[in-house]
Image (cartoon, rainbow, N blue to C red):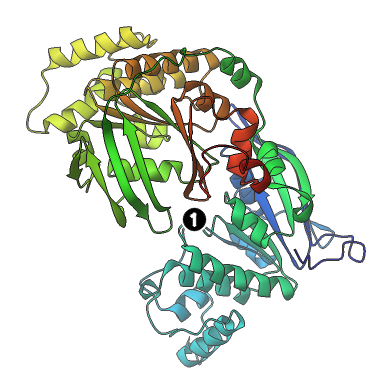
Amino acid sequence: MNTQVNHDAAPVPLLELRGISKSFPGVKALSNVALRLYPGEVHTLMGQNGAGKSTLIKVLTGVYTPDSGEIMLDGKPIAPASTSDAQALGISTVYQEVNLCPNLSVAENIFIGRYPRRFGAIDWRSMQQQARALLQQLQIDIDVTAQLSAFPLAIQQMVAISRALNISARVLILDEPTSSLDEAEVNLLFSVLRRLREQGMAILFVTHFLDQTYAISDRITVMRNGEREGEYPCSELSRLALVNKMIGVAADTQALADEPLHDGAASFGPNVLEAEGLGRKGALAPMDFHIRQGELLGLAGLLGSGRTELARLLFGADKADTGSIRINGKARNFAVPRDAIAADIGFCSEDRKHEGAILSLSVRENIILALQARTGLLRAIPFKRQQALADEYVQALGIKTASIETPIGSLSGGNQQKALLARWLVTNPKMLILDEPTRGIDVRAKQEIMTYVTKLCRKGMAILFISSELPEVLRCSDRIVVMRDRKACGEYARGELDDTTVLQVIAGDAHATGEVAGVAT
């Protein structure tokens, strides 16, 4: 790793955040966070979902005003009140979703809002010449008069970076820029970042991918639960240590992990679902996958490792580029989720509020949604049947609600999650995909949900279980597939992994994982 900065010679950072705190109603998003960026370095910001990375970036770029703390640029305090303020100060951001206009030309996107003019009219020739020159700094040679939409996402991100350079950016923030890129496109982006680093730019790189972190970073700041866990030179922080610092173990999670869910006495039937070479560009490398009748299969890995991406492909929420799926031995093509529902597959999304519960509808209406979708819009489920189903599952799952007609938005998070589980159980699925089913709910509700889920498995249901809480995955799963950087990197039977070895596999610790059975190398 060639760090471009001599901190002894340049002790003052270009950009520094000190004691940054930010709260929202009922949530402390940031608590006394510090961050230092030096010119001529790539500084990577790492942390699990909810660690505070996005909030910190929004404070830095003027979207949020911090409750306390200060931001220093060149040793002087600044207080950007908007993204335009931040840009005027030389702080530019390139987001995961390129925030440009695909219907305009490349040159227009680079200069939008700042078109060069001559005699009061746009000087198109000058704009195109300047656009070519900016892109040539990144060694990108494309037709700047062509529509942006004609180019792949990696090139569109280079255009966004060129726009940042055109407004004299000194600090470049890249927020998950590689999440939709393939390996060749990532290499192109990294070659550009290395050139910008050599030119003295300070780059803040936000990612979930371990391999990319160690390929490009000079220093790493780790965040956890809204606080800065620490700042480390990349060369001095092992992958295993990084994963440990990102995850930690919450006290309630450890307490839950101490309560076994079952005695391991499970018998499995034939494969319910088999996938061969299933993949999607920029989301999941082609992989083989199967799950058996009566099996609880856990997916372990960091956020962005490919767990949710696999679940969405299996459910038809995203379209696979490669591979095939077989259900009970028969080839199936899931163009949309309705096809998966018709094949007796259910899916509880990790995004409870946006992809799960419809907060303004009642508990009853939320519970019968999936069954109504499978039945068809023209064949309404009789109201008494809806009431009977809702009453049955409210009682079975212990959903605490004043009435089945109570809006689900007024329930606690744990009870909302139980109602969403009930939504799929009423369809009597053969396979159920649970993506972070216990996130954000109290320890007792977690125990109740997972106990019920385990009982479903013992009755023959196949369940794919995704959770960021590794002790929960270890104690619940009959088999575990570990994901890393959008690939499957190992498959393990129950008991083959423990709290230490699962972290080693996730981290890709070559020495340690070579001693663990079942690692895909």
Task: Find residue 494 and report its horizontal and vertical position in percent.
Answer: 49, 25
| Side of 57 where 106 appears, left or right | left
429 lies left or right of 46: left
Q: Quadrant of residue 353?
A: top left
Q: Quadrant of residue 375?
A: top left
- Classify 10 Å Cα crowding around label 1: few (below 14), some (14-19), many (20 and above): some
Residues 418 and 16: in front is 418
Q: Quadrant of the N terminus?
A: bottom right
- Residue 437 percent coordinates (x, y): 43, 27
| Amino acid, disc 1 | Ser
Q: Can I make out residue 66 in this image?
A: no
Q: How many marks?
A: 1
Residue 160 in picture, x, y percent from top left: 53, 69
269 and 326: which is toward the camera: 269
Is 309 above or below relative to 235?
above
- What residue is shown with label 1? 179
Visible residue check, residue 369: yes
Q: Is residue 366 left or right of residue 4?
A: left
Residue 253 quadrant: top right
Q: Is disc 1 placed on a helix, strand or loop?
A: loop
Q: Position of residue 135 (x, y in %)?
A: 55, 81
Residue 303 in the image: above or below residue 377: below
